[in-house]
Each structure stands twice: as structure tokens, then as C-alpha cells.
Image (cartoon, rainbow, N blue to C red):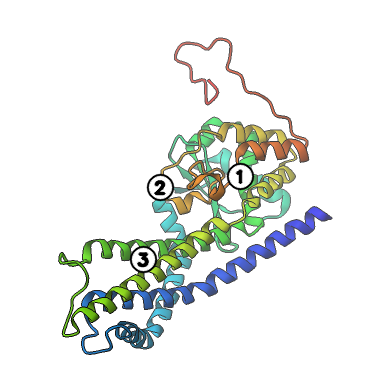
Amino acid sequence: MGAAYGLQTHIWNNNWKTVLLMAGFPVLLILLTYALFLLYAGFSGATAGMDPVAGPFLWAADALAQAWPFALIGAAVWFAIAYFFYQGIIDAATGAKKVDRRAEPKLYNLLENLCISRGITMPALRIMETDALNAFATGLHKGQYSITVTRGLMNALSDEELEAVLAHELTHIRNADVRLLVIAVVFVGIFSFVGEMAFRSMRFGIPSGGGSRRSSGGRDSGGGALIAIVVALAIIAIAYALAIVIRFSLSRRREYLADAGAVELTKNPDAMISALQKISGNASVDAPSEVREMFIENPHSDFASVFATHPPIAKRIEALAKFAGGRIAMPTAPAEAPVGAKTGPWG
């Protein structure tokens, strides 16, 4: 009962975070628009004849008063693009290709059997042609869900282990982790892009004489422009930092719950443990950092483990052994392998 309550709380939290992300996006977008106007006012000298200090701020506020409806329309357009094309964007970033039963019968049947056993709608299947061992799920609602696995994962794992990984990703769908991650990736992606562009423009847009253009306001005008530029960059930095905080605030507990869900679906904790053992150290995929947060394992951790998007695999295996009764088997290489034989990831 306690576990069920905890899982339901996790799903509720995911749903609330999704709503907050979507509601906060237009607010931060308007704030960012004001900062860009302020940046323009500081660099261009557009406030000639106005108060040297307050002029850039008043000019940016007036520009925002006229532009905010367009900012909200831009937010709506971005969400529409994200809703209809997010899967294509992710596929383009990862190189994933959709497959059907005819192309990959074993993989398709493993997932279909899991879905039939629990009355779950079958998600689409995709494959990334890479030797890395990894997998992830995407989707916003029923009918859009998809599970992607790498070719390396299919080649290295046994049927039982592959089934456990598919069950792990299916659990992310059931727990509403996938929808939150897709929204977070879209949310962070756009602000990261704007933030980088703003700092790039600052780097290459400052006149060689140093400082901004000065009109009849002379030195005072230059000082006001400099203050406006600093404040604008501070606002952009805050918006960017908030996006990063949101990115790293996604609960790492979701991976423990997905591992437990995989065991609940397959009744085979040993398969989940051995799959994680094989994935460990072999999961590095060339993909954008935001997308890697969706993977079953993300070995690329910025700023040490404090901001890691996933808990260590060793701790996940330890939890499966302790709470699911799984056995941790140490893989060993064969005593003697034929010359030229493919010995797999443990060879």
C-alpha cells in the first residue's frame, strides 16, 4: 500500500511539474524579451535624448508593452511546434528510425507481450544504429508514445534482459515521467538557445572602442547604456539558470521507480540487474545533453554527481538486490574463445 501511494504521489508530482513548466514558459519568455530589448537599447543608443540612466529601461518597457502579445503568440507557436514535431526533432538529434514487426520481429514481440499482459497500449518502436547500450522513451499522451533502443543494446542483451529494459521504459510511460521529460527538454532547449545567442551577440557585438554608442548624452549616456547591458545580461543569466535548475531538478528517483516497475512487469529482477551491468560503461551516445536525460543511463554528468541526471548504476543494482530480491552475478569471460569469435561485451 505504501509503495502504491508513493508511486501515485510521484505521478501526481510529475503532472504538477508539467503544468508548472508550461505555465512558467510564457512568463520567462516575456522576461527574456524585456532583457533582449534592454540589451538592444544599451548597444544601439536608441534612447538618445532620454534620461541617461532610466532611458534604456523605459524604452525597453515601452517596447515590451507593444511586443508582449507577440511573445505570447510565439510561446503558443513554439508549443504547437513542440507538440506536433517533437518526435521528429528528437529522431533527428539521435538518428533513431521507426521500425515495425516485419523489420524487428523479436523486439516487437517482446514489447507487445509486455503490453498485452497489462492491457497497455502498444507504443511505437525505434532503433538507433549505434554500438552503445542505451534506450529511452518519448511521448506526450496515448497514441504518441515511443520506445527507442540502440542496436548495440539489442546485440549485447539476452531476450530476458532486453525485455527488462523495455519494461523499464514502459514504466516511464506509465509513471508520466516521459511527458515531463519531453516538456523539460523543450523548455530548457529554447532558453539555452536564446541565452547562448545573447551572450554570443555580447561577445561579438561590442564596438571596438569599448562600451556602447554614445549620443549627445556623452559620458552619462554611456554609463546608463552600460548599466542597461549589465542588467539585461543578468536577467538572461537568471532565466538560463532557472532553466538549468529545472533540468537538474527532475527527480532521479524516477530511475529507481522504473527499475522497480520493470521487475513488477517481468517478475525477473535478475534480468534487470544483469542488463544494467552490461549497460554500465557502455552507454555513451552522441546526442544533445537534454536528450540524454531521457536515456536509461546518462554517463555524462556535468558539475560532478550533485547535478547528475541519473543515480549511479551501482546504487540502482544495490536497490534491486535489496528490495526486489535480485542476485548480483559477477560476469566472467569464457575460459577460451575461438579465434575471431565475437565474445560480446564481457569478452
**Residue sitting at x 36%, y 68%:** 233
Does residue 81 appear left or right of residue 283 in this picture? left
Can you identify the residue that label 2 sits on? 95
Query: Badge 1: how crowded within 10 Å, few (<14), some, or many (20+)?
Result: some
The amino acid type of the residue labelled 2 equals Gly
Q: Nearer the viewer, residue 301 or 313?
A: 301
Q: Earlier in the sequence, mark 2 or mark 1?
A: 2
Look at the image and tell me in which quarter the N terminus lies: bottom right
Depth check: give the residue in front, 318 or 56: 56
Q: How many marks?
A: 3
| Residue 128 is at least partly visible in this image | yes
- What is the number of the mark on residue 294? none
Q: Secondary structure at mark 1?
A: loop
Alpha carbons under labels 2 and 1: distance apart: 26 Å
Q: Which residue is nearer to you in this view: 271 or 320?
A: 320
**C-beta proximity under 8 Å, tags 3 and 2:** no
Q: Residue sitting at 17 percent across and 67 percent down?
A: 207
Dot 3 corresponds to which residue?
194
Q: At x 72% / y 52%, what residue is drawn?
A: 118
Q: Is residue 303 above or below residue 50?
A: above
